Amino acid sequence: MSMTTERTAGRRAGRRRGAGAAPDNRAPNYRQLRNPFPLMSVFSDDEAANMHDTALRMLEDLGMKVLLPEACRIYAAAGARVEGEMVYLGREIVEAALASAPRAIHCRAGAAHRDITLELGALAFQPGAGAPHATDLKRGRRPGSAQDFREYTRIAHHYDVFQMMSPSVEPQDVPTNLRHYFTTLAQMELTDKFPFLFARGTPQTLDNFEMLKIARGLSDGAFHGGVHAYTIINTNSPRCLDIPMAQGLIDFARHGQLSIVTPFTLMGAMAPITVAGAITLSHAECLAAITLTQLVKPGAPVCYGTFTSNVDMKSGAPAFGTPAHFQASLAAGQMARLLGLPWRSAAGSASNLNDVQAANENQLGLWGCLLAGATVIIHSAGWLEGGLSVSYEKIVTDVEVLNMVAELCAGAKAGADEIGFANALSQVAPTGHFFAAPQTMERYTTEFYAPIVHDYANFGTWTERGAQDASTRATAVWERILAADVALATPPDRLEALRTFIETRTAEGGAPPES
């Protein structure tokens, strides 16, 4: 079922329009968004510059712990001082790396109309990612499974407002040495959007690259000549780059694929308790990781990233959608603009269910990202419990907000047709109404956003329909999506070749993740 069909079905179910009403003919394109919002800063330009300078000083004087010997050798060959696992980066090395990092990255999806360009000013959304559990109102909270991963992929593919796929939920019923085969195959089968590939050691990464080449019909030259996939690289704050993440940076850079560097820093826990201190630490870690990609291959695609919020100082639990989270996003945006690089930020919620707290936290976090000018916003929908679960209902209710944001990205026009002097203003007498004006009749099926889950009925009508809240209505929405026929995103012959590759590698033992 297409997004437009789903909207039409949702609107008919939610509002019970009359039998004579015209169908919803809107067909919006949410695939190439630009951020229309004025950017905010939380610090002055001088303060931001001082944070950047302090981050460079940290890398020079305090160093970064790097657990992968190959990465240490690469840093050393560039002139860094390496003492055991400690790498001390001179600012001239970092500055040279930043100069070679691309300011715009053209990301090639499975279909050309799904391609996106990541640069400052562009806007792309990803659903919640990396959760060990899934939850919905029908089946309850449970460990993430292969079925959950496939279903979440289908839901994310259904909505145009997600331009990039994410590692939604960990399929824990698939062995770790085979899991990357399953997650990559599921994406190649079910979506033609820009895919996520795990970087959990070179054997798994190379398997993933080979599978992508098979599915996309790419030669080695074509694969290396374009950006066809991305991964997320998390540093281990404070100031540590572990073996699989360092190896992921190297492998993706060598093969010309995109790394999104994302320190996960929580104020008061693994980062200073202040916004300025936490972002300075995150910035330093980003600089060290970005530098590694450019030392491996100058011009390698890489995105700056941050995921910084605070902990609840009473329990130590992560908190999201807080004022500190909002400010941290603004500060990260200042640092990214100072570098000129595309960058990633995140929304999310610490609530345990899809309730008012969840909506409030996700929206405040989302607006922090939007006003900070984030290029990619991950965890924009579906995330609960600070990332411990993804909710089927929440992805739907959050998509409602993302769709509205996407509508705002189109702006509003004020030409003669929109002002409507001839076909609206001059057609209605004083104290009249515009329901039957020519302009209204021309536009009434296309002018306004049609909600997928919100219900605009009055109390009486809503009560007659069963008095369902938004989460209950969202259940019906995702059930309709999953009940629809599956359209394969890759030609059958390539899928067969892909399955043959997986069967061969499985018989050989697969590829355990490196640690």
Image (spheres, rainbow, N blue to C red):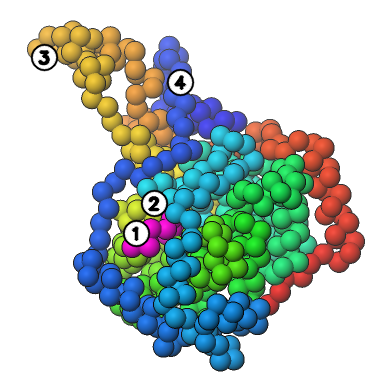
Q: Which residue matches tag 4?
A: 25
Which label belongs to residue 337?
1
Residue drawn at x 59%, y 60% is 231
Q: Tell which circle, 2 or 4, labels the residue nearer the N-terminal end.
A: 4
Q: Which residue matches tag 2?
A: 120
Give residue 130's quadrant in the image.
Answer: bottom right
| Label 3 crowd bin: few (<14), some (14–19), many (20+), radius 10 Å | few
Q: Position of residue 365 (x, y in %)?
A: 36, 58
Residue drawn at x 33%, y 38% is 408
Q: Which element type, helix, strand or loop, lies under badge 1?
A: helix
Q: Which residue matches tag 3?
A: 431
What type is the residue that disc 4 sits on?
Asn
What type is the residue that disc 3 sits on?
Thr
> Toward the viewer: 365 or 164?
164
Which one is in front in this view, the residue at disc 3 or the one at disc 4?
4
Q: Position of residue 118 (x, y in %)?
A: 47, 49
Q: Which element type, helix, strand or loop, lies under badge 4?
A: loop
Q: Tell which circle, 3 or 4, labels the residue nearer the N-terminal end.
A: 4
Horizontal side of residue 401 vs 381, given as left or right: left
Q: Are marks 3 and 1 in contact (CB under 8 Å)?
A: no
Which one is in front in this view, the residue at disc 2 or the one at disc 3?
2
Which one is in front in this view, the residue at disc 3 or the one at disc 1?
1
Q: Tell which circle, 2 or 3, labels the residue nearer the N-terminal end.
A: 2
Q: Position of residue 497 (x, y in %)?
A: 84, 45
> Toward the viewer: 152 or 333?
333
The alpha-carbon separation of the residues under discs 3 and 4 comes to 31 Å
The alpha-carbon separation of the residues under discs 4 and 1 comes to 39 Å
Asked whether the viewer can see residue 291, the reply is yes
Q: Which element type, helix, strand or loop, lies under badge 3?
A: loop
Q: Are marks 4 and 1 in contact (CB under 8 Å)?
A: no
Magenta-drawn segment:
336-346
What type is the residue that disc 1 sits on?
Arg
